[in-house]
Image (spheres, grey):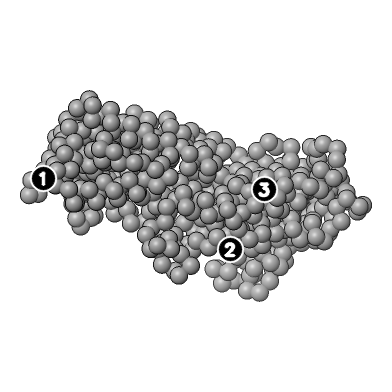
Amino acid sequence: MADIGTLLRDRLAAAFETVTGSTVDPVLRRSQRADFQANGALALKDRSVAAEVVAAAGLGDLCSRVEVAGPGYINLTVADETLNRMLAATAADERLGVSTVEPETVLVDYSGPNVAKEMHVGHLRSTVIGDAAARVLEFLGHRVIRQNHIGDWGTNFGMLVEHHVEGGVIDERNLSAFYAGARERFTEDDGFRDRARRRAVALQDGDPETVALWRSFVGISRRYLTGVYDQLGVRLRDEDIAGESDYVGALDGIVAELQAKGLLHDSDGALCAFPEGFNGPLIVRKSDGGYGYAATDLAALKYRCRTLGATRLLYVVGAPQRQHLEMVFAVGRAAGWLVPPARAQHVSFGSVLGLDGRMLRSRTGRAVQLAELLDEAISRARAPEIAMGALKYADLSTDRNKDYVYDPQRMLAFTGDTGPYVQYANVRARSILAKAGGDGPRREFAVAGPVDHALAVELLGFPGVVAQAGETLELHRLAGYLHDLAAAFTTFFERAPVLRGQEREGRLALCELTSRTLRTGLDLLGIQAPDRM
Ligand code: ARG
């Protein structure tokens, strides 16, 4: 089922082709003056083209009004009968008009906290953005593989395991305190330092007792993570964890293969790749023989392409890791693992700032614990689903490439561009439907007047927005759409008498479709839609 924007765009594109003999993008936009505006004729600097296009497009069956204005804008008002017909088709469709796409195996690498270190707000962003992306892609019909690339390996773990063995107390909600305790002992106590180093070697060599201790230590962190994901309503399960430790056994083979392909060079004892187009090296094996973050990522890339069969790989990771990831992708291509049409993309995001415009810090000046942040939101909100919705919406409604300011007061408000505002529009729709009684589905639409009309046009925009979000992963456009829909509904709700008016059935149908669209859209963002607030 085509959405209204696509229908109009296709018609206009064909007309532009007839008139000009070449391909012209109609540049269709929503408009203040009419429902839509097509600006494609502007670039041609010939107002008469616009008039000819209008004549050639023959939009009489879809629009009630088509006008050329100014230097060649085409203003389009959709006919109410068209809206009623399309609304009925949308309401009859379980998927609300969103078509499924040619399915691909899409791998989404997100969250990726480091189990023994501070889980910072950047991990929260990755978790929220990645989960929404995965939901949208799944809804569009892709086979989505979620991968949580946790940092659970490295020399630090020798120290941590030793601290654990020697009585260091682990507070699951505050793992960084444990980390800090281990660090302190490591710097101050020579004996401990030696034992920690021996522990690291034992872990590396697979000493069964040490490995068992490491496993229990990582297990505690994983339980904590599962708790956070549950609280957030994020669909990351234990099976989605593929930590750095899972690739340890593959690293020698990865190096051997890259060496055989002539992709590694010795640099002061370290083995480095120098992918084309980058200045520095990608250090694959350190001079002490140890493997780092890059080696693991290369092993993961090969596994994801070859074993999991992913053809679209999305890495939801903060902006500072851009160079690292691009280099890993480049080496993966050179090695023949990442082969077109398979492609990898860094789904980058900016930082979370405090109200002072600087990196978010807690009152004591250290980085903010994730748990603290969630607890704060929950204590300020009326219900957990409102708190989590607010938090996620605040993150997802800004262009992910930009930094955003964490402002609990603003994000929890019932007015403005907030999660609770969108949730509340749905609550209003539900309450009116409950009052009306008589279970849906309601499929008889009878758009009556400008307020109904505006809401109807908004409703029909959903399929286009979801399809676009799946391609660009610009989730803020989906959030923005839901906000606009909530706003159109709020206006409708306040101005149009629903239950008492003549148009009762048609308006109840609008309420029902609005609620379904808001719920589906919020669900795609990972946000709950409570019936009451
Ligand atoms: N653990 C990393 C960090 O905290 C993020 C992992 C991202 N994914 C990856 N495949 N490198 O920075």
Tell us which disc is closer to us: 1 or 2: 2
- Is there a contact, CB below 8 Å, between mark 3 and mark 2? no
Q: Label 3: which residue? A: 518
Which residue occupies the extreme front position in the image?
A: 167
Give me the residue at 58% from left, 62% from top.
409
Which residue occupies the extreme left position in the image?
A: 268
Give me the residue at 20% from left, 57% from top.
279
- Quadrant where the N terminus lies? top right
Q: Give the class, few, some or many, for how many residues have Cα within 10 Å of label 3's Cα (few <14, many ≥20).
A: many
Q: Secondary structure at mark 2?
A: helix
Q: Label 2: which residue? A: 410
- In the image, what residue type sits under mark 2? Arg
Q: Nearer the viewer, residue 376 or 299?
A: 376
Q: Give the class, few, some or many, for how many residues have Cα within 10 Å of label 1's Cα (few <14, many ≥20).
A: some
Q: Is residue 2 visible?
A: no
Tell us which disc is closer to us: 1 or 3: 1
Residue 69 in the image, given as x and y percentages of width and height:
68, 71
Residue 166 in the image, given as x and y percentages of width and height:
25, 38
Which numbered marker is on residue 287? Answer: 1
Give me the residue at 33% from left, 54% from top.
322
- In the image, what residue type sits under mark 3? Leu
- Is there a contact, CB below 8 Å, between mark 1 and mark 2? no
Q: Nearer the viewer, residue 68 or 505?
A: 505
Labels 1 and 3: the sequence-earlier one? 1
Q: Nearer the viewer, residue 19 or 158?
A: 158
Give me the residue at 74% from left, 58% from top.
490
